[in-house]
Image: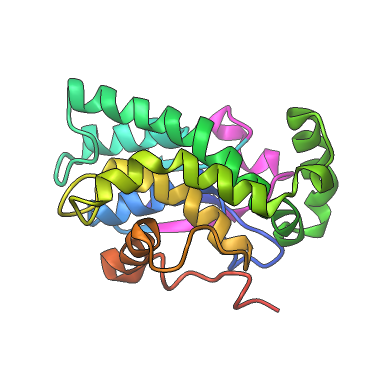
């Protein structure tokens, strides 16, 4: 039975922008696994009630149902050990640390760059829900949060260790991408997909890495629809 991934979509079903779903899509491609995606929107809670979860990604692999992007990636390593994403022991713990770094330092900076673009990319029926939940989380309006210049400055500072790592390798995990690359790429792809705003300086180390990531695994990410492609 084919693997199915419930994947967040926007105002157009082709627009897939969840950072967490992109982590999983890249992980599946990394392992050479075929899969299908099921587009899902924020208010379609009933569609994933079977998973006892209210958000995506949700991975269905035969009888197995797995939620949370990091748990899904670990499941894929356990079930399909070829082409490991994280490794074991200390390698796995470092990957967990990197996950927290991305979510707590990188993603908030990206949100400042694309907040209102993200709102526009969401299906109109979901926008009130998105605004209400995100404004409650951040304690301010999306309009106040949307500060692209400040976001870019914050992002550049947050990415300092990544720039240093990429001075010595093409990918965060070395000569080829693996789990850490997908953890960061998910968030960068999220912002890139919904906005025309520049995220980093053109042709700097992270920009070149991002372009390499768009091309890996037969260009699964590079071929994806963005707001640039959807009227």
* Residue toward you, 220 or 38: 220
Task: Tell me if 147 is positioned left or right of 62 in this view.
Answer: right
Q: Residue at x 31, y 41 (%)?
A: 180
Residue 72 colored in magenta in the image? no
> For residue 35, what is the image quadrant?
bottom left
Task: Tell me if 207 is positioned left or right of 20 in this view.
Answer: left
Relative image position of residue 112 (x, y in whole percent): 67, 46
Q: Residue at x 72, y 49 (%)?
A: 147
Q: Residue at x 57, y 55 (%)?
A: 191
Vertical side of 29 occupied by 58: above or below: above
Vertical side of 73 occupied by 152: above or below: below
Relative image position of residue 85 (x, y in whole percent): 24, 41
Label count reads: 0
Q: Please indicate, yes or no, whether residue 5 appears anywhere in the rendered image.
A: no
Task: Tell me if 96 is positioned left or right of 127 in this view.
Answer: left
Task: Tell me if 122 is positioned left or right of 100 in this view.
Answer: right
> For residue 162, what is the image quadrant?
top left
Read off the magenta span.
Answer: 36-54
Q: Please indicate, yes or no, whether residue 111 appears anywhere in the rendered image.
A: yes
Q: Quadrant of the C terminus?
A: bottom right
Q: Residue at x 74, y 44 (%)?
A: 43
Relative image position of residue 14 (x, y in whole percent): 58, 68
* Residue toward you, 167 or 227: 167
Relative image position of residue 172 (x, y in whole percent): 26, 46
């Amino acid at each position: 039975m084919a693997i199915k991934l419930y994947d967040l979509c926007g105002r157009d079903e082709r627009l897939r922008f969840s950072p967490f779903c992109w982590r999983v899509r890249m992980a599946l491609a990394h392992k050479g696994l075929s899969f299908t995606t099921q587009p899902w929107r924020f208010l379609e809670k009933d569609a994933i009630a079977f998973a006892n979860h209210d958000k995506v990604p949700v991975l269905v692999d035969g009888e197995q149902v797995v939620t949370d992007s990091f748990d899904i990636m670990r499941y894929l390593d356990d079930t399909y050990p070829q082409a490991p994403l994280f490794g074991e022991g200390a390698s796995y713990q470092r990957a967990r640390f990197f996950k927290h770094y991305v979510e707590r330092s990188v993603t908030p900076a990206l949100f400042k760059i694309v907040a209102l673009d993200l709102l526009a990319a969401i299906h109109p029926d979901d926008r009130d829900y998105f605004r209400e939940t995100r404004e409650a989380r951040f304690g301010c309006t999306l309009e106040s949060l949307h500060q692209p210049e400040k976001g870019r400055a914050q992002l550049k500072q947050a990415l300092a260790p990544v720039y240093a790592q990429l001075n010595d390798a093409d990918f965060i995990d070395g000569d080829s991408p693996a789990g850490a690359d997908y953890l960061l790429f998910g968030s960068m792809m999220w912002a890139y997909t919904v906005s025309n705003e520049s995220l980093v300086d053109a042709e700097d180390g992270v920009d070149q890495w991002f372009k390499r990531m768009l091309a890996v695994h037969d260009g699964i990410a590079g071929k994806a629809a963005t707001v640039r492609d959807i009227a």
